[in-house]
Amino acid sequence: MLDIAVIEEPAAAEASLDPIRSGILAALAEPGSATMLAGRLGLPRQKVNYHLKELERHGLVELTEERRRGNVTERIYRASAASYVISPSVLAAVSPDPSRSPDQLSARWLLALGARLVQEVGQLLTGSARAGRRVATFGIDAEVRFASAADRAAFAGELAQSVAALVSRYHDEAAPGARRHRLVVGLHQIPATPAPGTGTASVPGGTLATGSAAGQEN
């Protein structure tokens, strides 16, 4: 079982978003048959079996074992991954395009960068799985609490200068056989849990996230 799988096909995304099927995927973190799942979820076995076949057809669950019980063969399934992410490529015609309106201070542009990161890394994972190779990536996740908006702006400025200096030092346009990598650095406030009955949340903190979508390892 994979830790995380990226769903890139629209039909698979549609299958995963069905409430019953998403419940089955969650239940199949532990292998089980249609009969076992029916008991766990309180659903008719025939209904569970139908949804299992659809999930299997889209590669979201996999058959792990067949057990013979008298004249009946019990099929044991498990989810193909512990968790799933739907790639923006599922909505290719309307997926965010970071090149459309680049703006370092725009939350929507940051969201577009994140969407592209999910899409590109998902493509790399799919290709590497087929080739039986690893993907070279690097990520940093940290939190920082600013005393003021001025401190946040100063931090962003210093970070931009540091990244620009590193990129300038290591970028080599002429090196033969070199592979291009994408570096994304994002800074955003951390949404707080909404208060019961309000539906709104304050945003007292902040988080710094950096990621690199890289080519496959040599």
Image: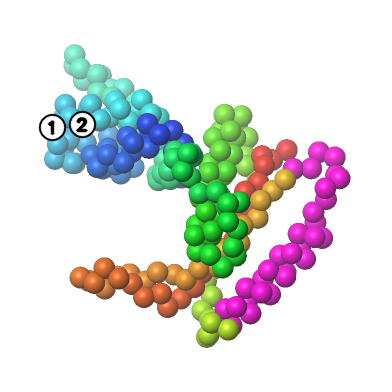
Kind of residue at disc 1: Pro
Q: In front: 38, or 108? A: 108
Secondary structure predominantly adopted by residues drawn in magenta? helix
Where is residue 33? Give x, y as percent.
Answer: 25, 30
Say whether residue 157 is magenta.
Answer: yes
Q: Which residue is mark 2?
A: 48
Count of numbered badges drawn on the protein: 2
Region in magenta: 151-179
Where is residue 159? Give x, y as percent.
Answer: 67, 71
- Helix, strand or loop status at disc 2: helix
- Tell me whether circle 1 and circle 2 mark residues in contact (CB < 8 Å): yes
- Helix, strand or loop status at disc 1: loop
Q: In front: 30, or 24? A: 24
> In the picture provided, is 193 more to the left or to the right than 106?
left
Tell me if I can see residue 194 in this picture: yes
> In the picture provided, is 165 more to the left or to the right than 105?
right
> In the picture provided, is 100 more to the left or to the right than 62?
right
Q: Residue at x 58, y 51 (%)?
A: 100
Looking at this view, name the residue that lies furthest to the top.
71
Q: Which residue is mark 1?
A: 44
